[in-house]
Image (cartoon, grey):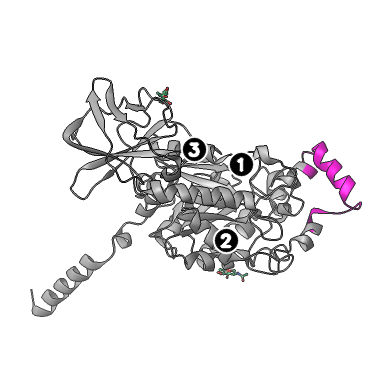
Amino acid sequence: MDTQLRVFVVVFGVLVGYMPFSIFCRYEPNWDSLDKRPLPGWYDEVKFGIFITWGLYSVPGFGSEWFLYNWQYKKDKAVVDFMKKNYPPGFTYADFAAQFTAEFYDPDQWADIIEASGAKYIVLVSKHLDGFTNWPSNVSFNWNSMDVGPKRDLVGELATAIRKKKDIHFGLYHALVEWFNPLYLKDKENNFKTRYFPVDKTIPELYELVNTYKPDIVWSDGDSTSWPYWRSPDFIAWLYNDSPVKDTVVTNDRWGGVMCQHGDFWTCHDRFNPGHLMPHKWENCMTIDIGSWGYRRDTNLNIFLPIEVLITTMVETISCGGNLLLNIGPTHDGRIIPIFEERLRQIGQWLKVNGEAIYGTKPWSHQNDTVTKHLWYTSKKNSAGGVDVYAITLDWPTNGVLQLGAVTTATPQTQVTLLGYSNPIKYKQDTKGLLIALPFIPITIMPCQWGWTFKMTNLKRI
Ligand SMILES: *[C@@H]1O[C@H](CO)[C@@H](O)[C@H](O)[C@H]1NC(C)=O
Ligand SMILES: *[C@@H]1O[C@H](CO)[C@@H](O)[C@H](O)[C@H]1NC(C)=O
């Protein structure tokens, strides 16, 4: 080999060695290839996020965010009567836009509340199935939050506020279908043999959202029409190969008939909480208001889940390998109402004490206990190379003993502590499991409420 060639070979070899893996590994636009992508690590670590459903439906605030559909397609009597009684004849859904005022929308205040909840990501609705975009989309003329209503870029403002928080990831929800978009209805009439709507509206919108706001999550929904119509794999391949967020972005499974089959994480169905391990990373998306994602005014105290249920759901979900995505619905004028705020701050209070058993954990060999009800496990590698096991009990037993039937491998070195409480905890290992002698703790110095975590170190490795 002459010197020039030799130099070339060496330089080329070094360059190749330093090239990022992704240059060689391009995902192809088919599910087989897309399914091979490893889940970006952050998503499994963070465990808990806040879903924010906000849009024009927050103006009538009646029934749910499906207001338009319920009114004009289903002709739901309650909604039709509500309109007759409260609005002049001929009032259209578009007329609500003028009342979408958002005058109290303070994205920094929202970010403060979200941070206080302990959530490490958010998913903001950028567009729901009514087609109204919460950002100045260049394919949603006069049907976006900059042209009408708030006259603000609601998405961009929250992205900026959330990013000031450093450790909260910003994600976006986007609905594929728009119930009443004329292009969509035309494609529907053609049995989806034509693709005017995805080509001119939905797909450009997705690219625009990702290029403009660089979300770490693209949370797709409104996928009642199957994926060949949307050509979802083409968009996801771009997301993974070439988008500005290709190394960090994760996406869900609502891309047109592939729920619980494809995507970085599975949502399967709303409020999915299987109670056992799944063969794939998954997320439980659920609401504090038990019946609506968007804000509604026809409500009462009983429809807001109490904190005990929210903590229980979080613990069940994370023990089984899921993430919890908890929804709130702000008002048309931009407020997070105090009951949502209170729940979020309560969760944050709980996580301050128990977060060690939540963030960055993996499921343990058992998810729940074999004997004691409402007792769930998580685990985490410790700095000594062993595994710490966390038992989270949602009841504080009244007989002074907590039986961990699933824990049979205590060693003389095993230590048990109660998170947030400094004294060591006494225990006994016998054939019935690990029996924890609960300390008597006056209520005023109880480390937390609603759920308590016992941490076990130096169990025998199995
Ligand atoms: C809309 O925005 C996207 C992304 O910012 C851009 O690529 C595209 O050219 C724009 N389209 C029009 C019609 O302005
Ligand atoms: C643990 O979970 C399984 C599966 O959901 C359930 O069948 C079992 O009853 C639970 N165990 C206890 C002690 O509650």
Q: Residue furthest top?
A: 431
| Secondary element type, mark 2 | helix
Three-letter amino acid code of the residue under disc 1: Ser
- From the image, tell me which residue sits under label 2: 110
Q: For marks 1 and 3, give the CA distance.
A: 28 Å
Camera-side residue of 456 and 137? 456
Instruction: Report whether 33 appears left or right of 200.
Output: left
Say how many tags the image has. 3
The x, y position of residue 135, in whole percent, is: 63, 65
Q: Residue at x 36, y 57 (%)?
A: 26
Front label number (1 vs 3): 3
Q: Residues within 10 Å of mark 2 (few under 14, many from 20)?
A: some
Does the magenta segment cover residue 247? no
Q: Within the displayed image, which quadrant is ligand 2 positioned in?
A: top left
Q: Residue at x 87, y 49 (%)?
A: 86
- From the image, tell me which residue sits under label 3: 313
| Secondary element type, mark 1 | loop
